[in-house]
Image (cartoon, coloured by chain):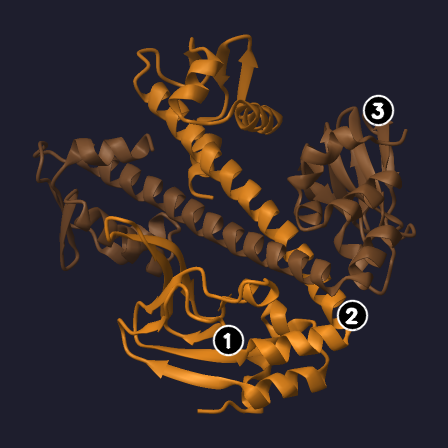
Chain colours: A orange, B brown
Amino acid sequence: MSISNAFIPELRRSHLFSCLEDDAVNKMIATAELIRRPLGDMLFHAGDKAEKFYIVHTGTVKLFLLASDGGEKIIEIIQAGRSFAEAVMFMEQNRYPVNCQLLEASEILAFENETYVSILRSSPEASFSLLAEISRRLHGRLVEIDNLCLHNATYRLVNYLLSQIATDAEGGPGIHLAIQKSDIAARLSIQRETFSRILARLKNSNLLKVSGSNIQVIDIEGLKALLDE
Amino acid sequence: MSISNAFIPELRRSHLFSCLEDDAVNKMIATAELIRRPLGDMLFHAGDKAEKFYIVHTGTVKLFLLASDGGEKIIEIIQAGRSFAEAVMFMEQNRYPVNCQLLEASEILAFENETYVSILRSSPEASFSLLAEISRRLHGRLVEIDNLCLHNATYRLVNYLLSQIATDAEGGPGIHLAIQKSDIAARLSIQRETFSRILARLKNSNLLKVSGSNIQVIDIEGLKALLDE
């Protein structure tokens, strides 16, 4: 079924539409379609001609490849609000490189590549606006990944330190751990630079002191609070 | 100082150059510059005219804003190999929106926006190739974020389950935990959907069984092994 202007706010949240002029968005809506499919349906197969890109309106789809042994390699799980298969419209080879199957009954918005590309071709401003938007988002995602890695590694390190305190015979605050920092980092699969950054943060927060290869815990409750962050 | 063709392999790893033809890369190199600066130096201030974009060759820089109370809000820390300030060249307002300062003595490659933009304007293929590359990278980063969130949440949940087993009076495998799943999820700051996905994975791996609000641990060693992943 064709889609209405009621979808405009939803489309504007996607980087593919946030950067278009109103009349370009209307042109896209005129050629768009809302596809309703049951769980398990294939939306497209790898190698199919790529004529559309998509935004998941409700539900979930997966992108996957078939290995030579017939096994599935899942490339991406895409949930409501996310676009997919848009990169291929900018490529010379216009065939989907992956398979797409519905993981639950879903409603998917489908847009014609040809219309979108013609909008960009006729307006360098639209292209540049899209490039600016994706560049910003790419930077934002890299920051998010850095934060997640740091958070994850902090959780592991603090968790490990607390477990060592619990088994220390002397107990109480100011416990002395005679463990090589490099050994702790390796044990917890934390990169050396990340490990140093976390230790520096814990020192600056007065949660522990580090002298040489020794770590002295100053504030156990403060460390425990980090696990709940 | 000007830069040489020796930088080509390094440049090709950036999405900004991986999609350009050889002669376009050479054109960029001809106008590029290697900037060496000491720790603490400002590379640009927010509001400065944006005439260049950058790739960190060695060292680290930070992008930051000044709050009204004079405090710094760090937007991003950028390490060797990463580009920055490129989004602004695609925007109408060509002023840097942030400040950039060196966190250590660094070598930074600087490229002229004007040259890069003129390459894209004269070749829709170059624009589309860049759009394809950034779209792919953006999707890749989203997958990475999903994986990191799932990994982090799995670590927390498994860690919590193991801590509960250790304090259970009956001990041994097959321990019965009479805890509401929703309570565990809330306690560990894990989103409901993520929590369900993790439990499903742990069940499928025969590490535990779930019946109603009860979780029965089947394979303690298997769970412990997940903490080392």
Q: Give the letter of the chain under mark 3.
A: B
Residue under pointer 2: A124
Question: The numbered mark 2 sits on a residue in which chain?
Answer: A
Q: CA distance from mark 2 to mark 3?
A: 39 Å
Decide which of B196, B130 is in the foreground and name it.
B130
**Are discs 1 and 2 located on one and the same chain?**
yes
Q: Chain of mark 1?
A: A
Residue B18 percent location from the top left of the image: 66, 46
Q: Which mark is residue A52?
A: 1
Q: Is residue A44 left or right of residue A196?
A: left
| Residue A13 on image: x %, y % | 59, 72
Q: CA distance from mark 1 to mark 2?
A: 22 Å
| Three-letter residue code for mark 1 | Lys
Instruction: Give the residue at x 62% y 53%.
Output: A138
Callout 3 amino acid: Pro
List x then y, in percent, for residue A131: 70, 61
What is the quadrant of residue A112 in the picture? bottom right
- The residue lying toward the viewer, choosing from A210 and A68, is A68
Q: Residue under circle 3? A: B38
**What percent of the width, then of the height, locates residue A110?**
48, 79
- Could you say which disc has been placed on residue A23 in the image? none
Please give the name of the residue rendered at 10% of the width and 32% of the height, measured from the top-left corner.
B171
